Amino acid sequence: MPILIISDIHANLAAFEAVLADAEGQWDTIWCLGDIIGYGPNPNECVDLLRQYDHISLSGNHDWAVLGKLDINSFNDEAQTAVRWTQSVLREDVRTYMETLPTTLLKEPFTLVHASPRQPVWEYILDAYTAAVNFSYFDTTYCLVGHTHVPGAFQQENNHILVHQPDYRQPRTLSETRCIINPGSVGQPRDSDPRAAYALLDPETLTWEYRRVDYPIVQTQEQMNKIGMPEKLITRLAHGW
């Protein structure tokens, strides 16, 4: 059975539930690439839901910030507000679970990181140059990353980096050459498509499938408004940026 590949849920329970419903019966374990919490209104609920399933998860930069492992002054004002609110509501058992999450995992032939193999918690791989530098920081054929909230892949082909855009609902066999692959964000996409993003991976056939699914954005926005999240964080959900 395939693996459900998710990243950057960002405490958006409605988006997470939509992904699980869309992929129901098509996977038997979850690989989560980090940032379960931060930005959204349901940090405890998202962690609780993830823990109901067989899964592995990484810790992302927002997870670290909430846990006090990052100086939140490195975040913009809106993100700082979200971090402080999340810190104020995070249950102790959820905090204890979050403290156990690593920043890097090895699942041959995959390396899993939140941001990049060079800087697992913080660096954004958004262009071919940054991707090229990062290939020397992992030894497996494939590296799965999140953090950018943008789905896509960078393929190392001889001395060139090929950039691949997602082709949704079209299962593809992974290239035999090395790749850095991003499934996109469940809870806060930033590629001008507000739908929740995720992927399915068949580890036996090395088949990868990008997916998008609609979710009730207004529901999340209303919850964020009720708890006083910054307007920018609320508005961006509807626009995918």
Image: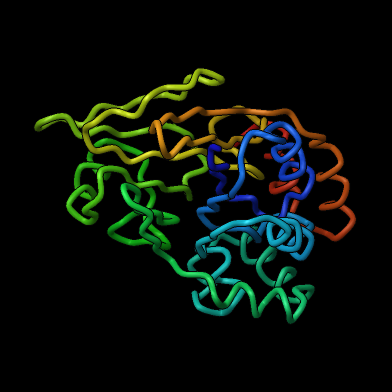
Q: Is residue 60 above or below residue 211?
A: below
Image quarter of residue 94: bottom right
Q: Residue at point 53% right, 51% down?
A: 31
Q: Is residue 240 above or below residue 32?
A: above
Image quadrant where residue 114 sits: bottom left
Residue 128, percent from left and from top = 26, 36
Of 132 and 79, nearer the camera is: 132
- Front-most of residues 73 and 31: 31
Where does the N terminus fall, quadrant-wise? Answer: top right
The colour scheme of the drawn protein is rainbow
- The residue closer to the viewer here, 135 or 109, is 109
Q: Seen in the image, is 240 located left or right of residue 207?
A: right
Q: Nearest the camera: 136 or 176?
A: 176
Q: Position of residue 9 (x, y in %)?
A: 64, 50
Q: Assign the C terminus to one quadrant of the image.
A: top right
Residue drawn 48% across the image and 34% down it: 151
Instruction: Tell me where residue 155 appears, x and y as whole percent.
Output: 26, 32
| Image coords of residue 63 (percent x, y) | 58, 67
Counting the numbered discs, the total is: 0
At 54% from the left and 42% from the top, the residue drawn is 3
Instruction: Say left or right for 171 vs 65.
Output: left
Q: Is residue 140 left or right of residue 59?
A: left
**From the viewer's perspective, is residue 171 above or below residue 156?**
above
Identify which residue is drawn at 21% across, 33% down.
Answer: 177
